[in-house]
Amino acid sequence: MVTAETSQPVTDPTRIGLTKEALKQAFVDNLFYIQGRFRDVATANDIYMAAAFTVRDRLLARWLKSAQHFKESGARTLCYLSAEYLLGPHLINNLINLGILETAREAGEELGLDLGEILATEEEPGLGNGGLGRLAACFMDSLATGQIPAIGYGIRYEFGIFDQAIENGWQVEKSDTWLKNGNPWEIPRPKITFPVRYFGHTEPYQDEQGRLRIRWIPGLVVEGVAHDTPILGYGVANANLLRLWKAQATESFDFQAFSTGDYYRAVQAKIEAETISKVLYPNDEPAVGKELRLKQQYFFVSCSIQDMVRLHLATVGPLDTFADKFVAQLNDTHPALAVAELMRILLDEHGLAWEPAWDITHRTFAFTNHTLLPEALETWPIELFERLLPRLLEIIYEINRRFLDEVRVRYLADEARIARLSLIAEGETRRVRMAHLAAVGSFAINGVAALHTDLLKTTVMRDFHELWPDRFHNVTNGVSPRRFIVVSNRRLARLLTSVCGNEDWMRDLTALRRLESLAEDQGFHEDWRRVKLAAKDQLARWLAAKTGVRIDPQTLFDVQAKRIHEYKRQHLNLLHIVGLYQRIKQDAQFRPPPRTFLFGGKAAPSYAMAKLIIKLINAVAEVVNGDPQVNGHIRVVFVPDFNVTTGQLLYPAADLSEQISLAGKEASGTGNMKFAMNGALTIGTLDGANIEIRDAVGPENFFLFGLTEAEVRQRQADGYRPSDIYHGDPELATIIDLIDSGLFAHGDKTLFRPLTENLLRHDPFMVLADFRAYVSCQTLIDEVFQDSARWTRMSILNVARIGHFSSDRAIREYGERIWKVEPVPIQV
Ligand code: NBX
């Protein structure tokens, strides 16, 4: 291959060859020339690095070819703006996407290396909190696989989501040092940097044409440096760019500004600048409202928009075609400042008038909302905004002034409505509403599951929906079948391939429909159960090695793995467990099929109730697992440090998937899809994407319980009194009393009071209202699980019908309905 730009041949077989011999040679070369090691002294990390570079070399030709072709063809490009990417390990994914996993395994064997060990050495980039960040990663995978030209923009956090340790039953946060051994997947681009301004003031001036313009004189300028990672598609030569920004001090600015010789202050300025991309905020729902967080948001948005403008000017040219070349998706409100930033660049730096600048801006952005929880809606105090981003606030005021004029004419001065729609919330402290900025600045607004989109239209975005009904879309989330079947469940992948006759299902998950014809096949049932049992066995062995806890793969694995949140109701699951414990001890006749309850998930470090729930899970585990009377019947395990890597062990091993949020609270959920894709049956409420999953797999293959969203509203309106439920349900009362008794706290009666008291007095997520229905549903599950032919059939049908929940489908919908982007195949 000859690249036009350099005319340098890229043909060295040790760099691009996919044969076993080429891989071996490349690995040996890399170990020597990059790591500087002979085999006999190489550390596990040296070996991992040499393997990673071997694979990276094979991505580069595809990546550069993609970039070059996209540039030459002027392809319309999707830019995904996201503060989070929860990527998971790269090596295994790239081996699979290149189609060389088995070749690499054999090459390793011949070199005396175990590929499994090499893969286990990788530190996963945990640059996200949960669903939102993982969705961005699945979308990057599907964009490349779908051959859509795309750039993912984000922040290169030096410390990602904290590592979770459990000490004495409590969550303890340890800093995530994912970069300490080097990151072979990224290429720093020290020449691709942009200045980002903060603080200072603005002033008017006249340009050469005598027009009034605004200049922002900053008080601080920080530089963003691009760090690029190739994202290869599955079975295609397309590789897209993930460009993450690292903050650094701009020496030229700061050193000048400080008095000569004040070296200490200069160094301090450097530290202050670098702090911006230092650490991911570990909160998944409540907006934190810290100055540094706003700095982070503006930092990555400003670098990304400047980069897009630069790319456009360098390739296509005039800015009036910017929105034809680029479309930018705002992943929640975290990048909403992009709307004001693009305006600023067009107005202040390129001298456009307001109307054409707004026309471009408005045709560029689309906005995804991921939550209806009021505490998660981002707003920023005007005072902070004015101080930190004075020019952006002026632009936001002007956007708002023009927008509200439009509203005024449309609704004839309906003042209440104007106040509700305004980008500025009036009150004791005036605040900028980021969702309103995103909505006004975007041509499309979408929710992430059908129910969520409906609720969006009727609740938090109701006024916007009345104003612009056509802007609203639903795009139900999806997850990557490469990551969540092929990478994490090799045995299932092999079985699916043997049934389908080929691997096409990996990029068209609806091909799994073929499994339906085997749903009653006894021989196939045995294969199916063997695959599940092997995954359970693997999890059990990993858990024993990691934590010393032993679990029995023959038991029902009941798994709830997701961020810890009251609305997700891990405590509802716990009430059921405590109830079982009690009954097993008191009723010798009561012997449901043995179950292992597995929990995984991180709590935001400042979320006391979530941390108390973790403590209670571990406390119940300690008592239950230590009680010989119930041993062999139930076991409770908290799997520490739930992340993409541990998720890859949990999803394949689950028999039962807990998706038990209060109806109306979980925007979509994506774990629900990952479990079902791996043959787990779901116990779930009519919430988020559960509803669509149930429709797809068939109601008879889904364990439904609980209030509907409409019933939730009705009960709240009627005045919900959880204590009435407590008093009317003796079994429930006993369970709560047991938790209060100190049984799980070595006699301490106060430890779990905040939790039980909250349930009895407020119960904002209606745990008690759904308790009875949940327990009945669990009883049905016990019955069905004993009928192993029935269970297996249901499991097969879940996988057969889950194809719709592939992120490939979600990306296709975005591409066709919102982005208007076309696949651009790359040939190698
Ligand atoms: O986004 C999640 C929703 O809760 C899920 O229902 C949904 O499936 C998923 C993908 O659409 N939201 C989420 O993960 N939010 C965050 O992680 C988050 C992070 C930072 C922040 C607010 C929310 N400031």
Image (tube, rainbow, N blue to C red):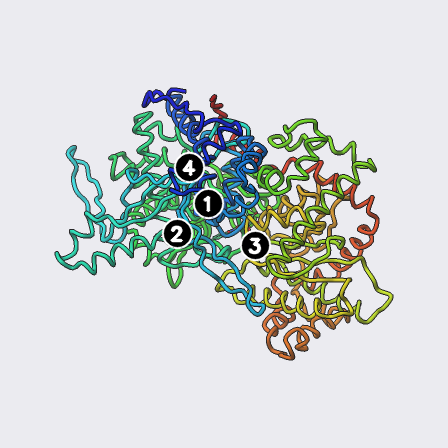
Which label belongs to residue 40?
A: 1
How many residues crowd around disc 4 within 10 Å: few (fewer than 14), some, or many (20 or more)? many
The local secondary structure at tag 4 comes to helix
Q: Amino acid at mark 3?
A: Phe
Q: Are marks 1 and 4 in contact (CB under 8 Å)?
A: no
Q: What is the x, y in percent for residue 667?
A: 58, 49
Up the image or down, 312 lies above or below 166; here it is: above
Q: CA distance from mark 3 to mark 4?
A: 33 Å
Closer to the chain start, of discs 1 and 2, is: 1
Camera-side mark, 1 or 2: 1
Camera-side mark, 3 or 4: 4
Q: CA distance from mark 1 to mark 2?
A: 32 Å
Camera-side mark, 2 or 4: 4
The residue labelled by disc 4 is 30
Camera-side mark, 1 or 4: 1
Up the image or down, 657 lies above or below 489; here it is: below
Q: Amino acid at mark 4?
A: Asn
Q: Report whether 646 appears left or right of 356.
A: right
Q: What is the x, y in percent for residue 68?
A: 38, 25
The residue labelled by disc 2 is 158
Q: Are marks 2 and 4 in contact (CB under 8 Å)?
A: no
The residue labelled by disc 3 is 642
